[in-house]
């Protein structure tokens, strides 16, 4: 046990975590030059395409230092704020963390957020200054920032480069010296913490765990504490580049168990594995339940695919525990699911994965957040969906979620960053100069305002320099109204939104203009209206495709032409009563990209 080290790599997005992990795998000969490819741990096609880590990945390395052989269990984590739940799970399974900071960018918002998580869990933090080979590197300035943040000595900061391999030997030595071996009692009853799981269509669900106390052997009779289900450990082993079976895993080891589990409901991340015969007294403190920030409906394009979509969502939830969903139905789209995501990127990735991994063609409704509605009968209703809003006459008040957002930016962009936040109904709470040209501003703002395009706008006005991190703080009263979109007088419930009264007119007008371009012309006029209750606030008309009925009337009396036009008008009116309007798929997505 004294030769095991469990550690993760944490950093802001794009600071070079996966590249550094690649170098460590090469240095410890876990990976041969022949098998090497960039970001080897990012196994998903989508991760490689976008250059981001979506899942945390665990792998074991063997390293010789002096005459001793050490087993290093590394977990590479994502950096984007939408996947922070993956980071929290990795941190629970480790005793130490490498805090990677980009020498060209300095400390950014997610660096600070991940660091606090690590400190809360009493992890030993080793600071690493990455990308030292770049000309734009500013090592001295960034070291000052790290010393201010961590309170460490300057000499403790390791200069490294994932690209060239500089400093990797020193990192490996520091891991062995500084990070403590796992603490636990090898002779106590088995206690193992589940931190991830993957679905395999041949062998059932692979469960990844860390042994906290005791030991587990192949063919042991084990049970999962939260679900109470019992299994035989058909195969256990460690996670190298491929899974390697072992006969026994002892205290401190990180590994996997395969026991032919078929149903995804039986595996809960954060659950405890113990023996049936000699069980542990209590379960390990698992992770806190994840709070979804953004809600959207996901519906199959073809209503017959509902059952397949349900199976796909179950398998996806195994792999991504931060996804939550429940069944719902819509008048326009039929049966589907109401899903909770951690952010818009998370939502986009889930949509992509449904398409690629399960070949599911889906429609996603307008994303929104959950509101608390207080009725006049003193009831509290949680509303995730505008169509679930009670009658306006019964509502006393509506509360919406607020977040505390911390934005770190260069000082020259601070004016436009503040204007953006104030336009989104934000209030400035704090402003701190971290260095002469880097400012951290703290805003309180409604979550509903940042759901749409806030992050994209922030990146463009700060030329990519601003970094953004947030957590939900409270619920506050808000003057919200439900904005409905009507086509020919019929409501399209997938396009309804709950919006602040001041923004409703502008938003409604923009949606109507956008839909006018996207809805194909029919044989009759289509009225597109935005309405609050019974009051129409905006209207556009898609003109009918018309035949020129007066073409044959050349010369003669005007009444002949008038008669033909009246006849056509009556026909169009009749057609409109029986015709219905198909809303194309792009129309649902267009609402997200209104600018």
Image (tube, helix red, strand yellow):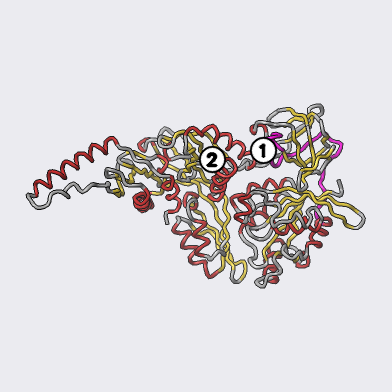
**Residue beneath label 2, please?**
360
Asked which secondary structure carries label 1, the reply is: strand
For the C terminus, the image quarter is: bottom left
Tell me whether the residue at label 1 lies in contact with that at label 2, contact meaning CB atoms closer than 8 angstroms. no
> How many numbered marks, from 0 up?
2
**Residue beneath label 1, please?**
199
Q: Verify whether residue 181 appears in magenta.
A: yes
* Residue 157 seen by the camera: no
Looking at the picture, how far across and down is residue 173, in whole percent?
83, 59
Cα separation, mark 1 vs mark 2, equals 17 Å
Question: Quick check: 472 above or below 420?
Answer: above
Looking at the picture, how far across and down is residue 273, in whole percent?
75, 34
Viewer-side label of 1, 2: 2
Looking at the picture, how far across and down is residue 479, in whole percent?
40, 47
Magenta range: 178-206
Looking at the picture, how far across and down is residue 528, in whole percent?
32, 46
Question: Quick check: 146 above or below 230?
Answer: below
Closer to us: 3 or 576: 576
* Number of other residues with Cα within 10 Å of mark 1, as a class: few under 14, some 14 to 19, many 20 or more: many
């Amino acid at each position: 046990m004294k030769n095991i080290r469990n550690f993760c790599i944490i950093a802001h997005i794009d600071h070079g975590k996966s590249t550094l992990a690649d170098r460590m795998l090469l240095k410890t000969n876990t990976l041969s030059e022949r098998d090497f490819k960039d970001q080897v741990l990012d196994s998903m096609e989508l991760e490689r395409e976008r250059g981001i880590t979506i899942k945390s990945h665990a792998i074991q390395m063997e390293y010789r230092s002096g005459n001793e052989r050490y087993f290093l269990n590394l977990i590479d984590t994502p950096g984007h704020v939408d996947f922070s739940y993956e980071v929290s799970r990795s941190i629970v399974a480790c005793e130490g963390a490498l805090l990677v900071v980009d020498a060209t960018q300095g400390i950014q918002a997610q660096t600070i957020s991940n660091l606090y998580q690590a400190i809360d869990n009493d992890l030993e933090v080793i600071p690493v200054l990455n990308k030292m080979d770049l000309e734009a590197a500013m090592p001295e300035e960034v070291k000052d920032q790290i010393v201010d943040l961590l309170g460490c000595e300057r000499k403790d900061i390791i200069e490294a480069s994932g690209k060239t391999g500089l400093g990797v030997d020193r990192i490996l030595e520091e891991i062995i010296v500084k990070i403590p071996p796992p603490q636990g009692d090898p002779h106590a009853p088995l206690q193992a913490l589940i931190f991830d799981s993957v679905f395999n269509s041949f062998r059932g669900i692979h469960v990844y765990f860390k042994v906290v106390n005791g030991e587990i052997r192949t063919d042991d009779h084990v049970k999962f504490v939260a679900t109470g289900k019992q299994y035989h450990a058909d195969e256990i082993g460690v996670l190298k580049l491929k899974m390697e079976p072992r006969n026994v895993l002892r205290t401190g080891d990180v590994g996997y168990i395969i026991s032919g589990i078929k149903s995804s409901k039986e595996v809960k991340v954060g659950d405890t594995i113990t023996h049936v015969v000699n069980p542990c007294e209590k379960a390990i403190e698992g992770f806190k339940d994840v709070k979804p920030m953004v809600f959207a409906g996901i519906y199959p394009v073809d209503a017959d695919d509902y059952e397949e979509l349900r199976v796909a969502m179950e398998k996806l939830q195994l792999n991504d525990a931060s996804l939550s969903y429940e069944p719902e139905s819509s008048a326009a789209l039929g049966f589907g699911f109401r899903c909770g995501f951690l952010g818009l990127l998370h939502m986009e990735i889930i949509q992509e994965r449904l398409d690629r991994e399960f070949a599911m063609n889906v429609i996603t409704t307008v994303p929104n957040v959950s509101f608390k509605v207080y009725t006049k009968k003193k009831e509290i209703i949680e509303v995730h969906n505008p169509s679930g809003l009670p009658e306006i006459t019964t509502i006393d008040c509506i509360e919406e979620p607020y977040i505390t957002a911390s934005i770190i930016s260069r000082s020259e962009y601070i004016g436009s960053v503040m204007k953006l936040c104030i336009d989104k109904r934000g209030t400035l709470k704090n402003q701190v100069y971290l260095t002469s040209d880097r400012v951290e501003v703290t805003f309180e703002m409604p979550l509903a305002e940042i759901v749409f395009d806030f992050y994209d706008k922030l990146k463009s006005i700060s030329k990519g320099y601003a970094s953004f991190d947030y957590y939900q703080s409270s619920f506050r009263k808000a003057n919200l109204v439900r904005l409905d979109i009507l086509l020919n007088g019929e409501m399209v419930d997938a396009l309804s939104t709950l919006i602040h009264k001041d923004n409703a007119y502008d938003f409604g007008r923009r949606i109507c203009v956008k839909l006018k371009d996207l809805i194909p012309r029919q044989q009759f006029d289509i009225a597109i209206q935005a309405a609050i209750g019974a009051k129409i606030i905006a209207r556009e008309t898609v003109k009918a495709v018309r035949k020129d009925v007066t073409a044959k009337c050349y010369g003669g009396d005007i009444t002949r032409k008038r008669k033909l036009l009246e006849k056509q008008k009556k026909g169009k009116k009749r057609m409109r009563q029986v015709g219905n309007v198909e809303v194309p798929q792009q129309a649902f997505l267009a609402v997200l990209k209104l600018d």
